[in-house]
Image: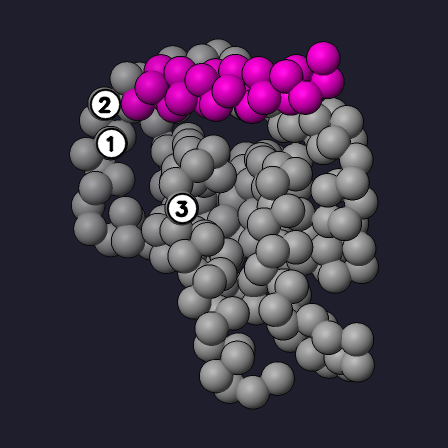
Amino acid sequence: MTLEVWLSLALLCVLGAMTPGPSLAVVLGSMLRGGRGAGLAAALAHGLAVGLYALLTVAGLAALLTTSPKLFALLQLAAAGYLVFLASDALRQRAAMTPPTDSTISGDRLAMAARNGFMIAFLNPKLAVFMLALFAPFITTDQGLGAKALLVLTIGGIDALWYTTVVLVLVRSGLLLALERHIVYVGRIYAALLLALAVFVASRAVATLV
């Protein structure tokens, strides 16, 4: 793979990662509840899930999803259910959402943030379709294992780098402190956003199944 081809792939990956959606909401929600460490855990786990999806896409999972609309819809329903779980979790914890300092973040809190970051990406079947379209110009029949590994590492690494940058910029710019002062309202807005996304995703899935 030439440098020019890789740069074009990297640019597409950056633009895809920058598109706002439920993943950004989950990463920001993790940061608000657990501080910078939790935000970074969610960001890195999200990148890992995206990289895993890229690996599965290269192996042919995306082709299966595009030929099986019902499987696609069932995965969408699973994603919608997880969004509802995250929303209810945010509402339950709104009274105790003041983020701790990084020195007091527990392992359980980091594990929960990482789990949420991973699952919100892994339960998004649109990623497979996106990657099928994204990788189509870059995969050839004579392509070696190294070139395919580079594809996977590129999209997973760029995704993790983007969300990590978002977390660090919010912390360093002082915007996180402003959000913390209104943490209860932010938590409610976060939950409402997740519920709206869940309804939207579920409605599309049901429309496919009926």
Q: Is 71 above or below relative to 14?
A: above
Label drawn at residue 182: 2
Report the front residue among 140 and 167. 140
Seen at 69% across and 71% down, the residue is: 139
Is residue 44 a member of the stretch shown in magenta?
Answer: no
Label 3, on which residue?
19
Q: Nearer the viewer, residue 139 or 109?
A: 139
Residue type at tag 2: His
Could you give the CA–CA distance between mark 1 and mark 2, rounded to whole angstroms?
5 Å
For the magenta stretch, what is the residue range?
186-210
Query: Dot 1: what SS?
Result: helix
Q: Quadrant of residue 35?
A: top left
Question: Magenta stretch: dominant SS?
Answer: helix
Q: CA distance from mark 3 to mark 1?
A: 22 Å
192 in the magenta segment: yes
Mark number displayed over residue 179: 1
Say which element carries label 2: loop
- The answer to the question of whether label 1 and label 2 lie on touching residues, with beta carbons closer than 8 A, is yes
Type of amino acid at the residue the image marks with label 1: Leu
Asked where in the image residue 191 lies, by quadrant, the reply is top left
Q: Which mark is residue 108?
A: none
> Which corner quadrant of the image does residue 201 belong to?
top right
Identified at 24% across, 31% down, the residue is 179
Q: Quadrant of the C terminus?
A: top right
On screen, residue 33 versus residue 55, left or right, reads left
Q: Is residue 76 found left or right of 13 in the rendered image?
A: right
Crowdedness of circle 1 by 10 Å Cα count: few (<14), some, many (20+)? Answer: some
